[in-house]
Amino acid sequence: MDQVRSFTRPFWVANIMEMLERLAYYGVRVVIPIYIASAEDPAGLHFTHTQKGTIFAWWALMQCLLPIFTGGFADRYGYKKTIAASITLKIVGYILMATQREFGMFLVGCLTLAAGTAIFKPGVQGTLVQGLNRNNSSVGWGFFYQVVNIGGFLGPPLAGFLHALSWPHVFYGCAIIVSLNYISLFTYKEVDSGGGVRGNPWEVIKLTMVEFFRPRLLLFIGIMSGFWLMLNQLWDMLPNFIEDWVDTSGIVAALGLNAGMMVAETARGLQIKQEWLINLNPGLIVVFMIPVAALVARIRRLTSIVLGILLAALGLVVSGYTMSGAMCLFGIFLFSFGEMISSPKMNEYLAIIAPPGKKALYLGYANMPMAIGWAYGSYMGGKIYDTLGDKAFLALRYLRENVGMAADAVDKIKRTDAISVLQTTLGKSPVEVTTLLWNTYHPYKLWYLFTAIGVVAAIGMMIYSQLAKKWANYEA
């Protein structure tokens, strides 16, 4: 309790703004893979998974690389101005995403939202850091991470409610929610960044690049890129994998659920909506983040990151190894605790080693590994899923390879009709066709590569941890 009482008023205001921003962001983030690429949603965009991966890759680069520079500008020009600009950009981005259905313009909307998010984060996190010290930083970052996930937890029910009205309502609703941060901004008292008032924009950029090329920082960024490549598959690939392959009818029957907010009627019967399975992740973090933060506060930061990466890697492969809804939930459970142990520690580590007056700058660097991991993971994952995981693609493949249908006839079948054509051709039910494709093509194997990347990242962090002991601030 003494640590909680030590938090300043700007710390609490920053947390409120972050929660609202995350509520809107995850209201879109948790359902947009379905909107973009699902072959079975009649109102979706019906892009391929490769196109979805391309969108997410550019989104990642914009959202995660821009803070490397906006962090320095936030230190130089003040947090309040950057937060105000970011809110406006995010509103414009949501509106574009609601109104544009062509690939190019929809991508522009996503990038506008990403730019707003990139500008928002350093200002809010810089405010947070100025109210923390070595004694309360672990609990402070844990609390911040919990607040982020309160927004993340409320996002899926918000998205489900708005999606019932229409897909555009999802984006318009999130634009309204993020606009509420203008109200928080009026109560926001500017915090001295400690960065001084000198320096033109080019000098800020020069400082950003000089600090970035410090060897220990580059090595840390490289290793953590593998972690983020693996971690983002929960949001980018698992939603589509759940909709295509995971069977939650047993959970529906055991809990006596009926069609409603959590359950949808599908071709395979009543199934829990994918966003509610994914929602176990922020839900667990809301409940357990503070106790976990207090527990791992006694562990070296780099050791905590290693343990978290390994647990998250195990959870990812478990979540997609079978068609069982219960096993998928168990995998998300393991993954979530791995995330809680490792992810906040990365920001905490960078905040601890950041020189005075460069806190937001170093927290901007925290986005670099996410940029590399998310961007490349999305691009690679889209291509992999199109080949190994997309049920519609595998249905067309089965018609060509196992039914003997002529290649030109298969090519004329629309992706949105592939499953129904296979069902009709074989005289099988949707459940039987799904099981047949699963047993024939083993789509669960796509998770092996991402899990292996996570394990390699953990091994790399073990080596980095041993090197860090030789540095002056080895206690980090």
Image: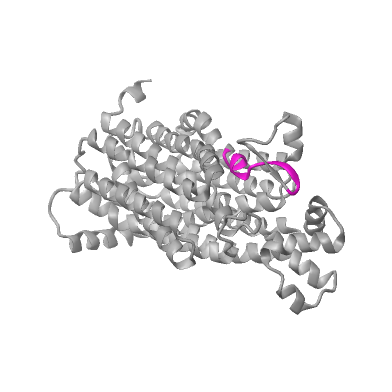
Q: Is residue 135 above or below residue 371?
A: above
> Residue 203: x, y in percent?
18, 61
Residue at 38% x, 42% y: name it: 176
Residues shaded magenta = 267-279
> Residue 117: x, y in percent?
37, 50
Tell me which corner region of the image, top left, top right, bottom left or bottom right, holds residue 254: top right
Residue lying farthest left? 198
Residue at 44% x, 40% y: name it: 23
Q: Quadrant of the N terminus?
A: top left
Q: Nearer the viewer, residue 307 or 118?
A: 118
Q: Quadrant of the C terminus?
A: top left
Residue lying farthest right? 427
Residue 276 included in the magenta stretch of the image: yes
Residue 217, visible in the rendered structure: no
Residue at 23% x, 36% y: name it: 186
Residue at 15% x, 48% y: name it: 196
Residue 289, visible in the rendered structure: yes
Q: Nearer the viewer, residue 474 or 427?
A: 427
> Residue 472: x, y in percent?
34, 47
Judge left or right: residue 124 versus residue 409.
left
> Residue 373: x, y in percent?
49, 58
Judge left or right: residue 424 versus residue 54.
right
Tell me which corner region of the image, top left, top right, bottom left or bottom right, holds residue 387: bottom right
Residue 132 included in the magenta stretch of the image: no
Judge left or right: residue 452 versus residue 370.
right
